[in-house]
Image (spheres, coloured by chain):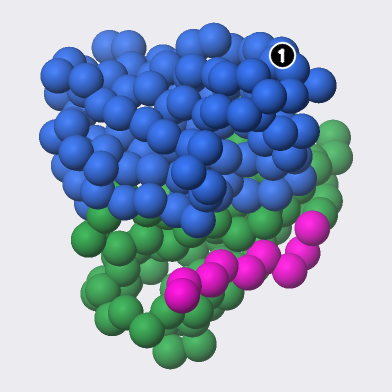
Chain colours: A green, B blue
Amino acid sequence: AQTVTQSQPEMSVQEAETVTLSCTYDTSESDYYLFWYKQPPSRQMILVIRQEAYKQQNATENRFSVNFQKAAKSFSLKISDSQLGDAAMYFCAYGTGANSKLTFGKGITLSVRP
Amino acid sequence: DAGVTQSPTHLIKTRGQHVTLRCSPISGHKSVSWYQQVLGQGPQFIFQYYEKEERGRGNFPDRFSARQFPNYSSELNVNALLLGDSALYLCASSLVRGVAEAFFGQGTRLTVV
């Protein structure tokens, strides 16, 4: 069974600085997707960034980038120039193309200090 | 364009009752998935429906059931509610069956007393 582990329950970052959120996963599949989702207090899960396992290049979306280490089964999220609006729960998730099932980690609470 | 809409946003039920939660996917999306998110945890997969057929089921008891309608909207039904069913129920829609991109609604907060 696939598992996703986020071992850091909380992190804090100073506004304008950079923070890295860690995630590891376990799977026997060779083709899969990895995601980072943001969940603010409004509860809606918002897709931050997506990585396809067959792509060696790390995904980037503006201030958000990932460090995807397939052999180590590691998928970390780097947030640059942190903003107050980045404060939220962040979930790492895994999925395959066979169905729409996403497996989520427990999440990490990110706070941003002004 | 409207995103994924869920109703109601909150509700309170008594143990033993039945509840129906509703989800309307993004226009053109044919896949709807349901997740349960207990406070302080990540969402857990309950069901996926694609083209009105069940395509995936998570590790939930038979008290949980769902269906998808011809317009691709979906209902999640839970019978004989338990206190442990209190959670945020999230609906996600995607264009096709795979998980290339899933869009979530704001969820229904269910409290069982």
Answer yes or no: is residue B36 visible. Answer: yes
Q: Position of residue A17 (x, y in %)?
A: 73, 51
Magenta segment: A1-9
**On screen, B105 above or below A4?**
above
Residue placed furthest toward the bottom: A71
Q: Residue at x 65, y 29 (%)?
A: B81
Q: Residue at x 49, y 18 (%)?
A: B20
In this rendering, would A109 be left or right of A69? right
**Residue that numbered label 1 is attached to:** B12
* Residue B86, quarter of picture: top right
Amino acid type, mark 1: Ile
**Residue B9 lies in the magenta-colored region:** no
Secondary structure found at label 1: strand
Q: Nearer the viewer, residue A36 or B57?
A: B57
Q: Main secondary structure of the magenta part?
A: loop
Q: Nearer the viewer, residue A23 or A112?
A: A23
